[in-house]
Amino acid sequence: MNIPSSLWVKTFPLIPKIFRGARWKIDTSEKVLYLTFDDGPTPKVTHWVLEELEKRQAKATFFCLGKNVQAHPTIFNEIKEQGHSIGNHTFSHQNGWETSLKDYLNDAAEADKYLNSKLFRPPYGKMTWRQYKALQQQYTLILWDVIAGDFLEEATGEWCFNNIKKHATAGSIVVLHDSEKCFENLKVCLPLVLDCFKERGYRFVGVDG
């Protein structure tokens, strides 16, 4: 399967140089991988992810939507109780390019009533320069080094796994999604990633604030 031209699996090097205040990759020589999950918590899907992580003593970071935490507080508490990191992904999955600065910041603040996190990831990775500068004052912005592409209609779980296997290195921040839309791909991809990188001597940890 060919990578769609619209998807940069490996973040283009120029972008982190422009948005220097965001974390795209963790600077480390240790064999550590930072798996992150966007758009949850989601019934069934997030539970399954937590079980797969627990089987392998792996930690991750969940960038949650405030509306989903509001709807599923028990699942959210389960994420925290298992020692995973939590990040803000806005309340209602706002596209920063289509949202005013005021509305975007208000949506993030609404999410934080439920999340109480200093980590933030913009949905779609899209934010204006003004949003970026304003968010920097309140949060540690976490973007990514590798994105699996599990949300693409033409993707397969094995293809997503191969994207991560090929591009992830020590300190990589990897994007996956614990959403119903991505579940079929995630069910194949996540166990393969966990087992493959564990065999390579990697540990899986959450992003620190």
Image (cartoon, grey):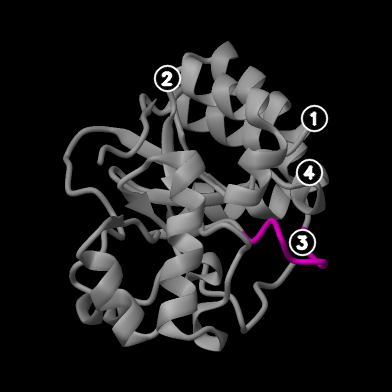
Q: Position of residue 147 (x, y in %)?
A: 52, 59
Q: Amino acid at mark 3?
A: Ala
Find numbered disc 1 in the image and state the secondary structure of the residue it sits on. loop
For marks 1 and 2 on the same chain, the one whose residue lies earlier in the sequence: 1
In space, the residues marked 2 and 3 are separated at their CA atoms by 30 Å
Determine the CA span between mark 4 and mark 3. Answer: 12 Å
Q: CA distance from mark 3 to mark 1?
A: 21 Å
**According to the image, label 3 marks what residue?**
155
User: Residue drawn 55% across and 70% down?
Assistant: 124
Give me the disc on residue 44. 1
Which of discs 4 and 1 lies nearer the camera? The answer is 1
Q: Secondary structure at mark 2?
A: loop
Q: Position of residue 45 (x, y in %)?
A: 75, 34
Tags 2 and 3 touching, CB below 8 Å? no
Give the SS element for disc 3.
Answer: loop
Residue 183 marker: 4
Dividing the picture into quadrants, the one containing residue 207 is top left
> Is 128 on the left-hand or right-hand side of 107?
left
Q: Is residue 39 visible?
A: no
Query: Is the residue 169 above or below the residue 146 in the image?
Result: above
Q: Amino acid at mark 1?
A: Lys
Quadrant in which residue 200 is drawn: top left
Distance in Å between CA atoms under marks 4 and 2: 22 Å
Which dot, 4 or 2, sits closer to the camera? 2
**Residue 25's disc number:** none
First to last magenta residue range = 149-155
Residue in the image at 36% along x and 25% along y: 203
